[in-house]
Structure formats: structure tokens, C-alpha cells
Amino acid sequence: MVASMHDANRSSPESLEITRPDDWHLHLRDGAMLARVVPPTARRFGRAIVMPNLVPAVTTVAGALAYRERILAACPDDADFEPLMTLYLTDDTPVSEIEAAAMSPHVAGVKVYPRGATTHSSEGVSDLSRLGSVLEALASTGLPLLVHGESTAPDCDVFDRERVYLEETLSPVIDRYPALRVVFEHITTQEAAAFVREAPPRVAATITPQHLLLNRNAIFAGGLRPHHYCLPVLKREGDRRALVAAATSGDPSFFLGTDSAPHPRAAKETDCGCAGIYSAPVALEAYAEAFASAGALERLEGFASHFGADFYGVPRNAGRVRLVAQPWSPPDSEGEGGSALRVFLGGETLRYRVVD
Ligand code: DOR
Ligand code: ZN
């Protein structure tokens, strides 16, 4: 049972048409997995910010452009989908690479993974505050810095990592570089939501469907639920409610980023399972569920289809998508055996369905 389904059921429209949405935070992987996971996103979303945490990581513009070609080759022929590429920041990224990225029409941001924070982050940044010339280059070019905001201090409690990173690292960097544009990715706490709400418009945040619909009890509901494990980890109910309030507030600083992160079932259901929730096939419907539970479906379009494009300085999409009130149940899994992908909310009943 998803947490938001405990909320009062407010009246909701029979159908809703919105501008074609974009996904401002997505993992597509590479090779055979890429071919499996591109179509669900390409069918629904106009564009997606594609995360660079491959092995090896996408650290150069040349690497990002080659990856972009592989993504386009995996798109269904009739899809109208544009991947927006990102570079993976390392301690050694040269300023010239940042400048080249800013010049490329296909690179939309630079991602910082604190070293050791999450999947494939071993080449990530050891101390963001020491990358002065890179931060200056980002600030002067206007290329956004996309931040996985979690402290990696070994003694930091896993539920405090986002708050500590915000206090110790992100907030000081935002203060020191007044022109730096920042997306605080997949925020999970009331502290992060309040920070972004009060920050200037150059600071924005993405919010995932799982952090709007679930709290940390979901990880332990009747037993250990590895498919509800993602990073940053789900937080308390009070945090979930603060995120719902932010997403449905109409504040353009908050926009859609699924963080859909596929891992084969065998890599999740094991001794040391991977972090990541595969939501792409149900993402828009999952957000609709969260907004409907809050009685705020009329605010979905801004969050899903307007505010991210406005922040990144690209036109809003021309196409439209329609959601109808038609209860349905997503499939539990895609694929067979250990290579199957468990789909977020598989087997649950969702109120809205996208109709083509
Ligand atoms: O849950 C997550 N999965 N969080 C991340 O930061 C990375 C992602 C992945 O790539 O699997
Ligand atoms: Zn991610």
C-alpha cells in the first residue's frame, strides 16, 4: 500500500490533458539494458536528462555524444524523443571540458556524485568545494551543476546524509558562487524542500515518484523489500508530505525527475543489493497518483511539463498527452528470471492511465 493512498480522496477529474512531459533525471544504462529501457521513456516523455554513471563513466563531451547516438539508436522509430546529455564530474575534470560541454547543444549539465555515495560513484568527486575553477567555469557559462546531495562521511547516519551534505557542502557552494545554477537532484527531506523553496531561482530540485508516494516503512513492510531501496533512501512520512507539498505548490523550482534506475532482479535480490527503482513504464501515472491524492491534479502539468524546460532554457514540448481516470494495475515485472526488471508499483492499483 502506498503511503499517499492513506490520504483523503479528493474529487478528481475524469480525464486530464497536459503538455508532453520531460524527465529531468533518468538512468538508461548501456548495451542490452539500454535497448530495454529507452522505449518506455521515449514513448511518454519529450526529453530526458540522461545520467552519466556508466562504467566507464561519461566524463567527456565526446563520450556523451557517442552515448547519445546509442540512445537514439535504441529509440522506437516513431518516437519523438531527445536525450539531453550530462558529464560525470571527477576530481580531474579540466575546465576546457566544461567549456566544451557548455558549447555543445546536446550537453545540458554536469553531474556531481560524491565519491562512494551511490551506484558507480567511485570516480566521483571527493570534495566539491575544492573544484574552484570548475565551479567558476560552470557559473560563467551557465551550465547547470546537477547534484547528488549526500554526505559520504562514514559516521554519518544514512538517514541524515542529505541534510548533512546540504549544510556542509551544497549550501556553502551555492553561497560562494552567486551565478552557479544548481539542480538539487531527487530531494528526499523537508530540509531540502525548504532550502530550495527559499533559495533564488537559479536553484531548483527534482522529485521522484517514489519519494512522493512512499515513506521508509515501505522498505520494511512485512519483510525486507529490496525493490524499494534507492538512494537517497526513502525518508519519514513528514518528509514525504513536505515533498508532496513542494511538488504540488506550483513553485517552478520543483520539477519532475524520475531517477528511474533499472537493475536486474538478481542484482537487487541478493546479499548486497543495488540501489535503484525502475519507474519509467509507470512514471507519469505514478506522479498523477501522488497529485490526485493531494487533490492537486491541476498542478501536474507545471511540475511535469513546464518548470523543468523553463529552468533548462529549452522550449516547452509541443505535443500533448492524455490521462484518463481508469483504474489499472501495472505488470509486476518486465522480462524473465534474474534479468527481469521489477516495475515500480507493479501489482498496485493506479487511478490514472495514459491513453495514446
Ligand atoms: O537509487 C539510485 N540508483 N540512486 C542513485 O543515485 C543512482 C541510481 C543508479 O544509478 O542505480
Ligand atoms: Zn539518479
Image (cartoon, helix red, strand yellow):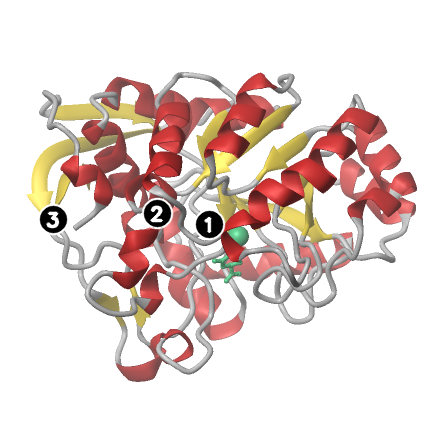
Where residue 177 sits in the image (x, y, percent)? 82, 27
Q: Secondary structure at mark 3?
A: loop
What kind of residue is marked 2?
Answer: Gln
Q: Secondary structure at mark 2?
A: helix
Q: Residue at x 57, y 45 (%)?
A: 162
For disc 1, the marked residue is: 259
For disc 2, the marked residue is: 210
Where residue 116 sits in the image (x, y, percent)? 66, 64
Q: Relative to 288, is 274 above or below?
A: below
How crowded is the residue under tag 2: few (<14 C-alpha within 10 Å), some, or many (20+)? Answer: many
Say left or right for 10 vs 99. Answer: left
Real-space Cα separation, disc 2 to disc 1, in angstroms: 9 Å
**Nearer to the camera, 285 or 182:** 182
Sequence-first disc among 3 and 2: 2
How crowded is the residue under tag 1: few (<14 C-alpha within 10 Å), some, or many (20+)? Answer: many
Q: Relative to 230, is 266 above or below?
A: below
Say left or right for 64 vs 6. Answer: right
Q: Is mark 1 within 8 Å of ligand 2?
A: yes
Sequence-first disc among 2 and 1: 2
Real-space Cα separation, disc 1 to disc 3, in angstroms: 22 Å
**Nearer to the camera, 341 or 9:** 9
Q: Secondary structure at mark 1?
A: loop
How crowded is the residue under tag 3: few (<14 C-alpha within 10 Å), some, or many (20+)? Answer: some
Q: Relative to 120, is 191 above or below?
A: above
Q: Residue at x 14, y 53 (%)?
A: 348
For disc 3, the marked residue is: 349
